[in-house]
Amino acid sequence: MRRSVLALVVSFTLVGLMFIGNVALAQPVVKIGAIFPLTGASAATGVKLKYAVEVAEEIINGLHPDIDVPLARTSGLPKLSGARVQFVFADHQGNPEIAKSEAERLIQNEKVVALIGCYQSSATKPASAVAERYGVPFIAGSSSSAALTERGLKWFMRIAPNDDMETKFFFDYLKFLNQNYNAGIKRVGVVFIDNEYGVHAAEMVDKWIETYKKDGFELAARIKYPTTVSNVDTEVQRVKAARLDAIFHASYIADITQFVKGYRAYDVTPKAVLNYCGGFQDPKFLENLGRDANYFSGSNAIASSLFAKMEVAKRINDLYKPKAGVDIDGPTIEDFSSALVMADAINEAGSTDPARVLEVLKTKTFYAPYFVSGKVKFDDKGQNEYSASVMVQVLNGVYEAVWPVEFKTAEPVPAFPPWRSR
Amino acid sequence: MLPQLLASGVIMGTVYGLVAVGLGLIWGVMDVINFAHGDFLMISMYSSFWVYTLFRVDPILSWPIETALIFALGYLTYKVIIKRVVDAPGLSALLATFGLSLILRNAAQFLWSADYRYLPDTVVADRRLLLGPVMIGLPQLVAAFGSILMTFAVFYFVRRTRMGRAIQATSMDKDAARLMGVDTERVYAFTFGLGGACVGFAGALLSTFFPVYPESGALYSTLAFVIVALGGFGNVKGALQAGIIIGLAEALGGFYLGTQFKYTVVFLIYLLVMQVRPKGLFGW
């Protein structure tokens, strides 16, 4: 009997200790909302962005002494007693209205202290307006519409270069090709999707063409196509009729893939095709198009060919690739960065108080060795001042960095060879 | 440029027409709008993709598999879902197919991810014909010929066979057909299957040049509604003719008015026709 009582007491004590232990081990959790297109037409990209944010969460909460980024060498947020960071995902389905309501839900119901997202600029716009109303910091990773940082918002920041910066980058690259490779590029056209991203990209071309007219460039075509498009034959016919030397494309992965097939089918051979941050950067572009993807170009925050020069990016990719099945790309690493920078700012603030987090975001230069610029710093409008991209061109099925020359991994091919000779 | 636009418009129009034939049959016979019609198309494209990827059977040869598969999917859809709501009042059938659409689309994303997939190196891939100034991709040309053949096959099936006449009879007056000994239940199930077979066939041909992803069928479905309304409910030839009109409107309107307006032109034509002739251009 006495033995039974003793066993009972010991059992209760052990269970009690386990319970107390669990309570002692339980750490506070800092919730950050992450809104992406996880279903719908852009879900292919949205799901990859989610994987990248999950990698950031893994790096922040786990111990990764071999990865040279903030919060990797510690577990959780050290200045908040090791609090874990939890990214709460929401799906906006590519719909601005849903992006808005999901931002509202995350702030009010899930009690997130900050937000990141939303990939499509048209969704980022209303979601960030909600964050502004509630006084919650919002970092957009890869939304590139220049208009987003022109609204005078206090709580909104953006990692990616905007369409304004990218358009100037494109014209400078074309000048470089003309001057150094005698490319003879004059007639430029912009082909763009009819949404926030595409329309603003086209507006930036309208703006910058005035500056670059003295360099011999003219805007020969503006071709806008619907967001839901069943086939792009008509658009390709218009491109062909315009006899363009260079095309600036603001398109997502499905559209740009169809355009490339159309260019091949109708023998459209411009000298250069430059893609804004969008579908071109998705490695599925190479997988789906095979050798037809060669010679297309675009700005990109990272390329697999740069991994040899950028050890940190390679280590991040080692965690990302098993989840996504493809190498990390430009938009994806920009959203990875938005997650890491937000957590870094909360840690630096030592608090989840929005005002203190915002102060850190507005004043600190963040260490970001996974970008060629190596850092992130937001200007008065919330735009990352150091959002340096490289121009990449697909050569032999690989995204090679071709410009600026200090980052190049291969020589650019200044003009498309004819389709029939490929 | 005009001959090229005409050719492109007619070619895409025939495929739109075939997709609409399937929708129109179901709509015309049992007065059910199948919101999952585009998703049947998407399932057919995935089937074509997987048959090619796993067994290297080209879509040009594997179309009987896709056609039979989507026929079975349509037949089962009737037996499991539509049968219970076909005579229910209000929007029951509409909501049931809308729910089915969501299930199919999300199941596709769950099973096969949201990635866009293309079938590389099919028999017709990257081949094209040059007819003077007109350039036509072989995949599109094969899809157009296939769609025309399938449309006429369905047309003659409905006109000449016993089941076809039963379909016509049920479409005209279900109760009278039943009194004449027609098994209308069987006719309904078969019609849903036949509608599926049309998109099953179209999906196999489309997969040679159109990306395969969970939303593949969404726009085709929307265009099919317009085409059915123009062509007349249950009118097989009318659907083909209306499909070609829509294909031409898309190509010519997009080129001359601006590509952002191409669907505006399509829906404008639809609205105008509905004002003048609510039964559609070729409706009974």
Image (tube, grey):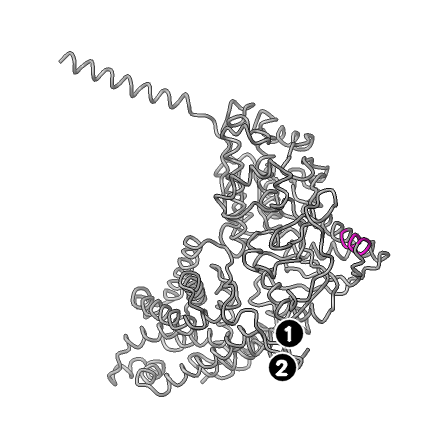
Magenta region: A173-180
Residue on which disc 1 sits: B253
Q: State whether residue A421 is above or below residue A287.
A: below
| Residue type indicated by callout 2 | Leu
- Left or right: A156 in relation to B62: right
Q: Residue at x 79, y 56 (%)?
A: A181
- Which image quadrant is residue A202 in? bottom right
Q: Secondary structure at mark 2?
A: strand
Q: Quadrant of the N terminus of chain B?
A: bottom right
Q: In this rendering, does residue B36 appear at all?
A: no
- Left or right: A65 in relation to A222: left
- Which image quadrant is residue A132 in? top right
Q: Quick one: A93 or A332, which is closer to the camera?
A: A332
Residue on which disc 2 sits: B131
Q: Quick one: A37 or B268, which is closer to the camera?
A: A37
Main SS of the magenta part reads: helix
- Left or right: A298 in relation to A45: right
What chain is tagged by disc 2?
A: B
